[in-house]
Amino acid sequence: MPARAAEEAARGSYGRLLAYLAARTRDMAAAEDALADAFAKALESWEKTGAPDNPEAWLLTAARRRLIDNARRNETRAKGEEHLKMIAEEAAERTQDGPFPDERLKLMFICAHPAIDAAVRTPLMLQTVLGLDAKRIASAFLVAPAAMGQRLVRAKTKIRDARIGFDVPETEDLPPRLSAVLDAIYAAYTTGWDALAGEDGKGLAEEAIYLARLLTRLLPDAAEALGLLSLMLYAEARAPARRNADGDYVPLEAQNAALWNGAMVREAEAALVRASERGQTGRYQLEAAIQSAHALRRLTGKRNWDDVVKLYDVLLMVSPSVGAKVGRAAALAEAKGASAGLAALDDLPDKTVAAYQPYWAARAHMLSQLDKKDAAREAYDIAIGLNEDDAVRRFLRGRQSALGGGEP
Amino acid sequence: MKYGLFLYEDEANFFGASEARQGEIIAAYMAYGEALNAAGVFVAGEALEPSKTGALVRMQGGVRDVQDGPFADVKEQLGGFYVIDVPDLDTALDWAAKCPAAEHGEVEVRPAVVFDN
């Protein structure tokens, strides 16, 4: 099955081939074009002759030929041609003996470089490391495809023209640069997580976990990379329990823990333990620890909301975000009662929460516990209106009508 | 920036639905309107009666031509619209995704022309 072979090669090798070519030509867009061309040729040629023994070497040869052709056509880059030939020879040597060098770490760091607009880092990483097409990326991020295409092109032009280096940062620069890489990967996960709500499937969650696994392999000492992997695995492990047979949304406290993916929970725990052994705490490890506490509570039946509040307290010191503040308030409501939770929500500035769905959902829940029905009904309305997922809308509507009274 | 959100959906989804289902749909739109208001982005919006209640007007060479709706044999009809005021297209798309019509039909998002003078 030649098409299948090309597909497999694409999944496994796209990022590695692109990292190799782009790190040497320093022109991501040109490397992508050449690689796309090589894949197209592979489909055509493997159809007739069958897949070669070493598909990566085949693809690399085809891609560098294309790069050399382009360089020839472009006289102003005559000098580049010599360079490209050199690359080609070097690559040929390398692919002949032993595995192809994996330089995707460089690619990840350049995608999350501080000179690149934060909003385009994740899309750039998905496109270059995983070879995802721009249309799908645009849809996942709810951006018009043409606009997303332009943003990606601009970012690549900037990398080329500003000569941003394809390097792994030195030790002292590593933590802030790594945290940008982690944020970009996590953004892919949270985007995918939202998309998972849709019936059509998986969003980008799988891709994000792939990237985090890759990162923990390439940088085994990075505690926060393990923390991020753990966090995503905890969340992902619960995916099978987030909907019931009717497609209705099931909140964490009501989930059937037997439906969780046990292997994933164990991998998440192991990653968190490995992270803590590195002795450098951080946002992602703390968020993973909160997920671990939720899992533990559901698996043992022992209420541990005080622990969850404490973890949020530390998280807020490290990384104060509106999400963490709302999360803390919700945990506080469980630990100390709804009025304590509501008071914590009231402390949040209106502007940051006006369009933040979890705030309104938490608020509605606490108000209904305090029997403030009208206010609860209104908060439910806003929470419902801020949702894209019909299953969650139905769930909230159910809770809202359980309040009784109000409009028919 | 002002953006128009134009809601296209098979109108039978609403006008052909049970009263209970209609109530759910109306509640979803009420909630959406509340959310738009709470976020301070709502400018205007209307739900429309079914397309067969409307008419199409054309002036052809100075002669009036009026046709009864529905206007064309399409699966999805314009069922309503919102005008929202948000900083950019990304934000407008985000609101469009939350619109109940996006679930079963589609929401066209169009920036309003800015005339400078």
Image (tube, rainbow, N blue to C red):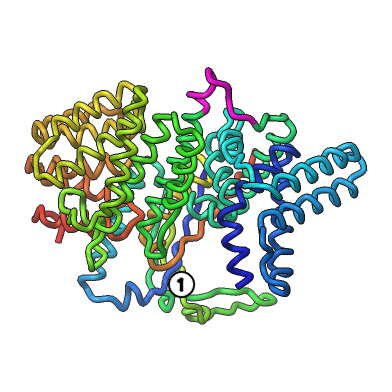
Q: Nearer the viewer, residue A218 or A332?
A: A218
- Tell me what residue is drawn at x 22 percent, y 32 percent: A328
Q: Which chain carries label 1?
A: B
- Left or right of A313: which side holds A218? right
Q: Looking at numbered disc 1 in the image, what kind of residue is underneath it?
A: Gln
Would you identify the image quadrant in which residue A356 lies?
A: top left
**Residue A173 in sight:** yes
Residue A75 screen position, x and y as percent: 92, 43
Q: Position of residue A107 (x, y in %)?
A: 60, 38
Q: Which of A82 and B21 is in front in this view?
A: A82
Task: Determine whether the residue tagged by mark 1 lies in a helix, strand or loop.
Answer: strand
Along the line of sight, which residue is nearer the eye, B52 or A190? A190
- Read off the residue under disc 1: B77
- In the rendering, at what x and y percent does residue A237 appear? 30, 51
Q: Which residue is drawn at 47% across and 29% down?
A: A179
Residue shown at 39% from the left, 35% from the top:
A226
Q: Position of residue A233 (x, y in %)?
A: 34, 46
